């Protein structure tokens, strides 16, 4: 009898790499304690991001299904309150629907409780049009959240396994003589131009996980010139500060996209830093590509600015000086 019972036992090791173990176990292992109560006949041994489960085949299978569903919910929503976990264990479908309805406009749950979601109508429009189009231009002044929203959409796609990697790029407009005088190796010379992209990533991915992604090139941050000759596939690609790219550079970048890539191009046509003898390729690209199916444009305005209240007035004042250029 004992031998027959042993044959019915099974052992499974469940690993969760893409979520914070604290989010799963709960503070002071409160979530883990609730799981043990829900499956009293199983032996659970935890170590870091691994759970070893030993018990009856049927119980182990049900436990594995529940845990995988819990992990999926944490990946989507960032955490599961302990007080709701009991209801989730026995009424998972309705719980999942309630959580998704409540968080339908949340893009990313970042570390330390940070919630990233659209804060203006045009930011929401970026999220909606990104779902329906493979290339999206987000044009608007500083402070409108276009880059931040684009990075959040890329992180969400990576967490949802819709893409295999994220590629973030922007022109280094001073990549000529002045770059050579900066101290350090090539990465140290380039990083100051890419700081806004790093700042956005810091808000959305725990530092250990971000370091892992960067070291394994799951997330790449590089200047635009490094895109030449590549095919960017199974990736979410963001070109930031595109107003500082020439026609040739924008054409080069847009023709790098593979068949399974998503792309957001952000830019501010009022802040062009190119030399006077070079014209920005962003306005040209928006005009000649606007009628192509699968390409969309969102124009953000000072109404989308979420910085200091005076920033809107500053943008409006400078905008009047640039109307003549924008209408050419």
Image (tube, rainbow, N blue to C red):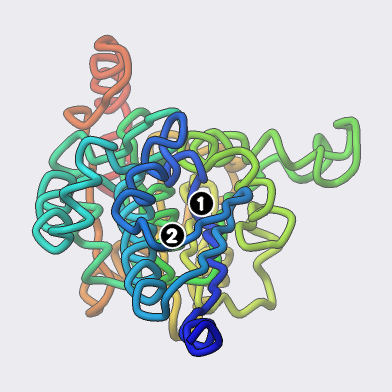
Q: Is residue 220 visible in this depiction of the protein?
A: yes
Sort mark 2 into few (<14), some (14-19) or many (20+) by Cα contacts within 10 Å.
Answer: some
Q: Is 272 displayed left or right of 223 in the figure?
A: left
Q: Of helix, strand and loop, which one carries label 1?
A: loop
Q: Is residue 268 something one can see in this rendering?
A: no
Name the outermost residue toward the top: 310
**Residue found at x 90% / y 31%:** 183
- Foreground of the two, 140 or 132: 132
Residue 31, numbered circle: none
The answer to whether 3 is drawn above or below residue 78 in the figure is below
Q: Is residue 326 left or right of residue 228?
A: left
Question: Residue 39 at x, y = what percent?
Answer: 34, 58
Image vertical order of residue 44 relative to residue 269, above or below: below
Q: Is disc 1 surrounded by few (<14), some (14 to 19) or many (20+) residues within 10 Å?
A: some
Q: Secondary structure at mark 2?
A: helix
Q: Residue 263, position in %: x, y? A: 42, 65
Q: Are marks 2 and 1 in contact (CB under 8 Å)?
A: no
Q: Looking at the picture, how far across and down is residue 16, in whole percent?
A: 52, 59
The residue that appears at 32% across and 65% down in the rendered structure is: 66
Q: Which residue is mark 1?
A: 279
The structure residue drawn at horizontal position 43% and vertical position 69%, both measured from the top left corner, is 161
Check disc 2 and report the residue beneath it: 159
Point out the frontmost of discs 2 and 1.
2
**Frontmost residue, 65 versus 20:** 65
Q: Nearer the viewer, residue 3 or 292?
A: 3
x then y, percent, for residue 10: 51, 79
How far apart, in angstroms, are the residues tagged by discs 2 and 1? 37 Å
């Amino acid at each position: 009898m004992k031998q027959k019972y042993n044959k019915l036992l099974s052992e499974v090791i469940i690993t969760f790499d893409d979520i914070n173990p604290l989010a799963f176990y709960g503070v002071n292992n409160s979530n883990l304690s609730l799981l043990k109560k829900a499956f009293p006949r199983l032996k659970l041994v935890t170590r870091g991001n691994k759970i070893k489960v030993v018990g009856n085949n049927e119980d182990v299978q049900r436990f594995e299904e529940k845990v995988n569903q819990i992990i999926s919910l944490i990946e989507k929503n960032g955490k599961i309150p302990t007080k709701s976990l009991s209801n989730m264990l026995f009424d998972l479908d309705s719980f999942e629907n309630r959580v998704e309805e409540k968080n339908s406009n949340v893009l990313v749950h970042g570390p330390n409780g940070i919630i990233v979601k659209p804060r203006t109508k045009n930011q929401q429009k970026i999220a909606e049009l990104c779902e329906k189009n493979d290339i999206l231009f987000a044009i608007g002044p500083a402070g409108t959240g276009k880059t931040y929203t684009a990075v959040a959409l890329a992180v969400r796609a990576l967490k949802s396994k819709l893409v295999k990697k994220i590629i973030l790029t922007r022109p280094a407009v001073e990549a000529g003589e002045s770059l050579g005088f900066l101290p350090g190796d090539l990465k140290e010379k380039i990083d100051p131009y890419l700081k806004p992209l790093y700042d956005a990533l810091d808000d959305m991915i725990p530092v250990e996980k971000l370091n892992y992604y960067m070291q394994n090139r799951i997330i790449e941050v590089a200047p635009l010139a490094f895109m030449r000759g590549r095919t960017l596939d199974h990736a979410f690609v963001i070109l930031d500060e595109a107003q500082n790219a020439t026609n040739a550079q924008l054409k080069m970048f847009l023709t790098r996209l593979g068949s399974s890539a998503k792309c957001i191009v952000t830019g501010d046509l009022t802040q062009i830093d190119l030399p006077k003898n070079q014209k920005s390729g962003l306005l040209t690209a928006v005009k000649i590509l606007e009628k192509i199916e699968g390409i969309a444009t969102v124009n953000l305005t000072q109404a989308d600015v979420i910085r200091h209240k005076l920033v809107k007035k500053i943008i409006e004042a400078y905008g009047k000086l640039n109307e003549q250029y924008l209408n050419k």
